[in-house]
Image (cartoon, rainbow, N blue to C red):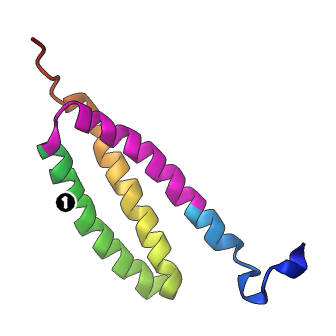
Amino acid sequence: PSSWIPDSYKNIGEYVILWAIIIFIMTIRSTISNLYHASLAFKQLAIRGTASAIFTIIATWYFILKFDIDGTLVGRMAGELFLMVLLAVNVHKIPQPRTG
């Protein structure tokens, strides 16, 4: 079956691993993010999302300078990890929704 894979796709194991890590982090982050949504904590989510976006832009720029085009994935991973940590660290501060 390896003859079915074009030469341009061989030796991409590093990229597959990076994407696997990114998707793993995104899965955890989205679960925490859903807790913010369910608790109607949209303002806190927006503030942390904005901070994460700024961090991601800076991190991606830095990693592109350091690793060339591969830095885009590293920057994406850093941004997702940063947002996940921001959300997880402050999860205990989510206001509980009022009931009836």
Residue at image coords 36%, 62%: 79
Query: For the magenta stretch, what is the residue range?
Result: 20-42
Q: Is residue 85 left or right of residue 19?
A: left
Q: Is residue 88 left or right of residue 36?
A: right
Mark 1 element type: helix
Q: Quadrant of residue 20?
A: bottom right
Q: Rate crowding at label 1 as few (under 14), some (14 to 19) or many (20 or more) other CA atoms within 10 Å.
A: few
Q: Is residue 100 above or below residue 35?
A: above
Quadrant containing the C terminus in the rendered view: top left
Amino acid type indicated by mark 1: Thr
Tell which of 92 and 13 is nearer to you. 13
Q: Position of residue 31 (x, y in %)?
A: 40, 39
Q: Is residue 60 above or below residue 76?
A: below
Q: Which residue is mark 1?
A: 50
Residue at image coords 32%, 38%: 34
Q: Is residue 71 magenta?
A: no
- Which residue is at the far front? 4
Q: Position of residue 80 (x, y in %)?
A: 39, 58
Q: Is residue 48 above or below residue 65?
A: above
Q: Is residue 93 left or right of residue 72?
A: left
Q: Position of residue 98 (x, y in %)?
A: 11, 18
Q: Quadrant of residue 55?
A: bottom left
Residue at image coords 62%, 72%: 15
Q: Position of residue 82 (x, y in %)?
A: 35, 55
